[in-house]
């Protein structure tokens, strides 16, 4: 497959950003290619298009599958595995948030709770105890907020993010309540009445 200049720029940049986010560059490039192409591709085609070793592609696909960002599909008359990703950016966003929360936030919160519950914790200096408790409280609130966001439909989540700046002013008491987003109250989104809950 021959990439267009736009596709090549997108794939290369996503690979660079992946490295900054702690994700292998080839993993990021494969996901970007599948997303930009919008159609299933087999491993050989991915390898040829990106100019990377077949073994590298296989390992990268396994990692993407472990993150639930890529799934296997098949074509009639072709025994090869094809790979595809969601082309819905909101679904991808929710998947990444859910996976990172389960892999990073939840284990850290469990460890912090164990530390605070330990009898030895009381032997630490009071200011150190405060810092650890504050860290635990912050991470717990962020994890709860993430859970609330993941329960919202993409339509409601989009409205919540769009209203972000207005809600911030309202919470500070700088202005009147934010105006309802377009379509609000028309029954177009079953989750719409939950949109403000995470902001409280």
Image: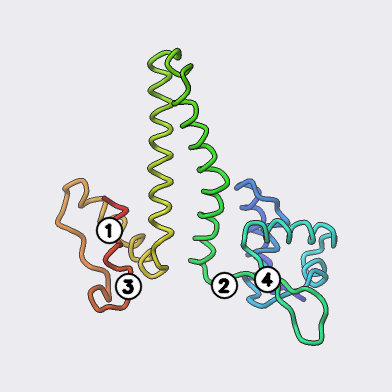
Q: Residues within 10 Å of mark 4 (few under 14, many from 20)?
A: few
* Gap between marks 3 and 2 measured at Cα: 23 Å
* Gap between marks 1 and 4 measured at Cα: 42 Å
Q: Which residue is mark 4?
A: 5
Q: Which mark is residue 87?
A: 2
- Left of 103 or right of it: where is 15? right
- Left of 87 or right of it: where is 181? left
Taking the spot 67% from the left edge, 70% from the top edge, the residue there is 34
Q: Which residue is mark 1?
A: 196
Q: Does residue 135 sit above or below 74 in this rendering?
A: above
* Gap between marks 3 and 1 measured at Cα: 14 Å
Pointer 3 or 1: first along the chain: 3
User: From the viewer's perspective, is the residue at label 3 or at label 4 nearer?
Assistant: 3
Q: Position of residue 55 (x, y in %)?
A: 84, 58
Pointer 3 or 4: first along the chain: 4
Pointer 1 or 2: first along the chain: 2
**Picture quadrant of residue 176:** bottom left
Pointer 1 or 4: first along the chain: 4
**Picture quadrant of residue 196:** bottom left
User: From the viewer's perspective, is the residue at label 3 or at label 2 nearer?
Assistant: 3
Q: Which residue is mark 3?
A: 190
* Gap between marks 4 and 2 measured at Cα: 20 Å
Q: Are marks 1 and 2 in contact (CB under 8 Å)?
A: no
């Amino acid at each position: 497959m021959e990439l267009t200049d736009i596709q090549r720029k997108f794939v290369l940049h996503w690979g660079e950003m992946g490295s900054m986010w702690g994700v292998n560059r080839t993993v990021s490039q494969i996901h970007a290619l599948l997303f930009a192409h919008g159609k299933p591709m087999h491993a050989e085609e991915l390898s040829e298009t990106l100019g990377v070793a077949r073994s590298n592609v296989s390992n990268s696909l396994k990692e993407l599958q472990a993150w639930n960002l890529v799934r296997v599909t098949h074509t009639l008359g072709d025994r090869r595995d094809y790979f595809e990703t969601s082309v819905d950016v909101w679904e991808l966003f929710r998947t990444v948030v859910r996976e990172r929360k389960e892999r990073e936030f939840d284990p850290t919160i469990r460890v912090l709770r164990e530390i605070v519950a330990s009898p030895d914790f009381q032997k630490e200096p009071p200011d150190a105890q405060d810092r650890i408790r504050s860290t635990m409280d912050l991470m717990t609130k962020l994890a709860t907020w993430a859970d609330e966001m993941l329960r919202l439909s993409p339509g409601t989540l989009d409205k919540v993010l769009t209203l972000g700046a207005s809600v911030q002013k309202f919470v500070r008491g700088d202005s009147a309540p934010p105006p309802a987003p377009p379509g609000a109250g028309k029954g177009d989104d079953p989750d719409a009445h939950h949109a403000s809950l995470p902001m409280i």
